Amino acid sequence: MKFEELPLANPLQRAVRAVGYENPTPIQEQSIPSLLEGRDLLGIAQTGTGKTAAFALPILQRLLDSGKFRQPKTCRALILLPTRELAIQVEECFKQYAQYTAISTTCIFGGVSDVKQKNCLVRGVDVLVATPGRLLDLIGQRAVTLKNVEFFVLDEADRMLDMGFIHDIRKVVGMLPGKRQNLFFSATMPKEISDLAQTILGANPARVEVAPQSTPIERIRQELYRIDKRRKGALLKELLNSHEEMKKVLVFTRTKHGADKIVRVLEKAGIKCAAIHGNKSQNRRQEALGNFKEERIRVLVATDIAARGIDVDDVTHVFNYDLPNEHETFVHRIGRTARAGKEGVAISFCAPDEEQDLRGIEKLTRVKIPEGDKSIYERLPEQQKETPESELRNARGRLPREKKGGPKRERRDDRNGVGRTAVPGKYRHAAEQSRENLQSGDAAGFSNRRTIGKNRPGSRARKRMREAAAASAAAQSSLIQSKP
């Protein structure tokens, strides 16, 4: 079957040819006819199988057929996505498919100013691509209303659940009109997602499942390296330097700090790279992603926030520098390669404390990951001997408080006005002396409780006060002696 055989309008067929599509993927071939009939749809497909075109083309076709016009501060089609990057990429796809039509598209997401987004919504839009948080924010500001929504798409539903958006999704669904077409897409279908789908989809929805749940794409060749945490950076650097075919590499790490650390290690080795994670501004993230797409950098290091938000062609290798805590995330990570019918390689590093995650991933995907070339270990630095403290520190939990070095500092709340004093501490003796002076009414001591707490013993102000008090006492003494 070819796209020419699908009942799409000429402007859409022209756009499909412009982007280079010839034959629809399985999910596109099964979804588009049902959606054109107006049926609700539950789609289960691995990432990289063409889900965006599967729902975008039918929605655009039905918008053209309806003959309706958008109204101010409204939208006719709402596409809800979990991350900014994914929202931006879906909007780009809609604009490509609608480039020969008058259908308008706008994307709203958090992390940036909402002024431009609200200006785009003043006249209304046909297709609104949004993340849940910013959408609810603009609804609260009355910048947009959902009363005219005809098509509702919830994409990456399982990721929505993982990121804690379930309550926001229910709020959005409660604001939608009862008569609408619902599209529900997810790469995996655990029980929680199935229950959510039943509350959104109408009766007897079309179900499209193009691959077994949570199974990685078969074109991806996987490798596994068992390595301690301290030598993961050296192993990554050695693999990149010894394999020239690794031209477009995506590295996933568990933490933002870990991503920045990998970038520093690779930059010292002369490898062009950049990091993308939640602490980066939206402009920096878009700049790094653009440089990676245009191959101005070789390696892009990302946290799981980008696991489903990166849609980059020709990614040759994906590295799991840290195995993910959630086993389903592994499927979405490695799905960034082997897209559009091409092949790819996924390489995973496994530290001793990650063996349990590895077993869970292999059980979920039903694939035993083969180990890579063991000769590379000979070119790495020798493994450092671990101490009990370093093992705890490198583990996922922090070192317990009572095992950290140094004596435990006690704190005592002084009720007499000196304030809180660390014991043992530098000013313990001076603080105790100050209390004695205060209680005895010594002229050289403090005369005001507020001053005691403000000027600690040994400070310049305290020295001046001591000198002034001594001078005053000397003057009084001389005055008494001079009296007959």
Image (spheres, rainbow, N blue to C red):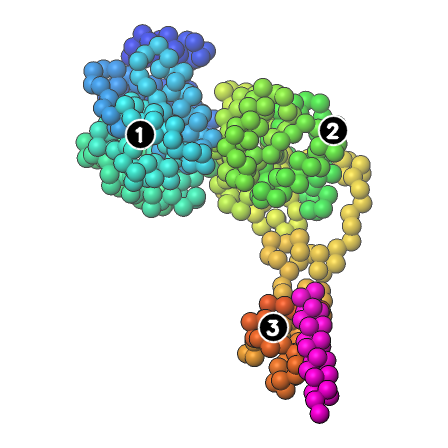
Identity of the residue furthest to the bottom in this view: 484
According to the picture, the residue beneath numbered tag 1 turns out to be: 78
Between residue 9 and residue 202, name the one nearer to us. Answer: 9
Residue at image coords 52%, 39%: 278
Q: Position of residue 167 (x, y in %)?
A: 33, 46
Residue 259 part of the magenta segment = no
Q: Position of residue 267 (x, y in %)?
A: 71, 32
Q: Secondary structure at mark 1?
A: strand
Q: Position of residue 68 (x, y in %)?
A: 20, 18
The first of marks 1 and 3 along the sequence is 1
According to the picture, the residue beneath numbered tag 2 turns out to be: 270
The first of marks 2 and 3 along the sequence is 2
Q: Position of residue 215 (x, y in %)?
A: 48, 35
Q: Identify the magenta region.
A: 459-484
Say whether residue 67 is visible: yes
Say whether residue 38 is visible: no
- Seen in the image, is 4 located left or right of residue 471? left
The first of marks 2 and 1 along the sequence is 1
According to the picture, the residue beneath numbered tag 3 turns out to be: 452
Q: Which mark is residue 118?
A: none
